[in-house]
Image: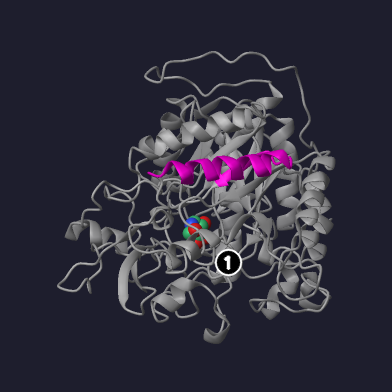
Amino acid sequence: MKPEATTPLAPWRPRAPPRPRPRLREDIVARPDISDSPDDWWRSAVIYQIYPRSFADADGDGVGDLAGITSRLEALADLGVDAIWVSPFYRSPQKDAGYDVADFCDVDPVFGTLDDADALIARTHELGMRIVVDIVPNHSSDQHAWFQAALAAPPHSAARARYIFRDGRGDSGELPPNTWQSVFGGPAWTRVIEADGTPGQWYLHLFDSTQPDLDWTQEQVREDFDAILRFWLDRGVDGFRVDVAHGLVKEEGLPDYTDEQLIAASIGDTTAPSPHFGQEGVHEIWRRWRAVLERYGADRILVAEAWVEPLTRMALWARRDEMHQAFNFGYLMTPWDSGALRAVIDASLDAFSRVGAPSTWVLSNHDVVRHATRLGLADVPPLGHGVGRDTPGLPETEHGVRRGRAATLLMLGLPGGAYLYQGEELGLPEALDIPAQARQDPAWFRTGGERYGRDGCRVPIPWEAQAPGFGFSPTGASWLPQPDAWGRFARDAQRGVPGSTLEMYRSALALRADLALGTGDFAWVDAPPGVIAFDNGATRIVTNMTGEPVTLQDPLLAGEVLLASTPLEGSFEPDSTVWIRRA
Ligand code: NOJ
């Protein structure tokens, strides 16, 4: 028995010359295409999300930057990921940590320069990885020149047409144009003061009031974004993660929510049909974007951030002529429950294969409570609300990390593409003790502190246990305070340490590549209640969620143990996953 297998790293490399893909009609139930074409790298790739503010800070100001990322990239090649996705680093007043973009074709000085972006792209490629950047088409910053021009222009002018300005309701326009609510809390409309000093029109912002929504019925907006895509493709990026890819198009006439929709929206529920999310018209935009990318080659990708349910609906974003992938948030939101997990895996494989796409799998990102904490909670707060020290039922750290590791090995055993979020490979839990005065998320401010928001998953990550700021920044400065206890999670405290979370991730990624799990054949295996078991090719993946140990003599576990999330010493412990080469 080998408790922790470590096999040589297998970075991405072209394998065979491209071959034409069969064209399937959308209504035919299809398996996702399995292809050796290097163009299809994304179908089985493991993509690592970098949140630039919190990854590595080269200039010592306490905010991560592009030079910092470049200087630490070797650690990601060493981890064995195929690609990185970098959250926004564009010019921005940082009211929503960079998702409020003031210039889509420039780098914010806090993150560096365009030369730094070029250096990052080049170094990523040199190390055999791909790079996907974020693009934010639903809205801009209120500091964008387009919005400033709109504010300076009169109502109903061409400059205002780029955004969604409307006259208010009520006798003197004193009421918002409709009842829509901002995802961050409060009304989704803000009234402007016109040039003559009087209160005037209102503009729509589905997020913060500093993030006005663009009007995608305008051809000018569409052309501007074509040019933005080309700007980054020309610089060599391999694709885009598309922010709010279910937004952009609003129902004609901007009708009020029903009471039911209003409640659903206020708790972050995306299943209810809404007049601003998941409108049919968005798909036409993705077809247009796909055509822009295809001119650069079939290996450039689009991945949708589309919070829509059910999965059959989300899969529409990954149709052959639209995006390549969509983040599987249905999977991310599934609690630690064997029945629920089986159901969501079935639904995912089915929904995405119907459109010929691979499923993706994801457990953490910069908007959700880190999975080493979240999966231990009995009641997970609604999306974006976050957790703090007083949240009921917080898991004890060891237990949360153990469950998080089991969840990761289960996820990485599934066929398709997988997304990792920086720090999860270190087993980081959510940071719970961020003082009110240090918090930054607009959701915290817009709800008067009622929602903790997302700062707890965005704390700068630890690199070196003994260095100031745990090696995040040479000065020890950090834009969000790092918990004192995080030294034990530092990368240098885990690298080369058998059984550490970092080594578990490294082994899992190396094995995943060697065993071709990303493109393997999936089949459920009968298992007792509370145990999840499936075969991926010749590899069996078993997770014990029963709360009790399972005996190692169980025929389910017959074969050579390749990797285990908890050491196997006489029994297969609860909250553990094991990978087995079947006998
Ligand atoms: C989704 C992003 O992931 C989130 O961080 C951001 O606040 C909103 N979109 C608005 O851009």
Task: Classify residue 13 by image quadrant.
Answer: top right
Say what amino acid the circle numbered 1 marks.
Ala
Say whether residue 372 is left or right of residue 236: left
Q: How many marks?
A: 1
Query: Residue 433, position in %: x, y?
Result: 56, 80
Q: CB of residue at label 1: within 8 Å of ligand 1?
A: yes
**Extreme left residue here?**
171
Q: Quadrant of residue 500?
A: bottom right
Q: Residue at horizontal 77%, vertical 70%?
A: 472
Residue span colored magenta? 217-241
SS label for mark 1: loop
Q: Counting other residues with Cα less than 10 Å from the Cα at mark 1, is it few (<14), some (14-19), or many (20 or more)?
A: some
Q: Residue at x 35, y 41 (%)?
A: 310
Q: Give coordinates of residue 248: x percent, y percent.
A: 41, 48
Q: Position of residue 372 (x, y in %)?
A: 57, 61
- In the image, 185 versus 404, the foreground residue is 185
Query: Quick check: is 236 in the magenta stretch?
Result: yes
**Quadrant assignment for the C terminus:** top right
Magenta span contains residue 38: no
- Residue 353 visible in the snapshot: yes
Residue in the foreground of this view, choosing between 338 and 449: 449
Dominant SS type (magenta): helix
Q: Is residue 94 left or right of residue 2?
A: left
Q: Which residue position is annotated with label 1?
A: 97
How was the colour assigned to the protein in this rendering? one colour
| Residue 558 visible from this viewpoint | no
Q: Quadrant of residue 33?
A: top right
Q: Is residue 154 above or below residue 161?
A: below
Horizontal side, residue 262 vs residue 171: left or right: right
Does residue 10 lie above or below 146 as drawn? above
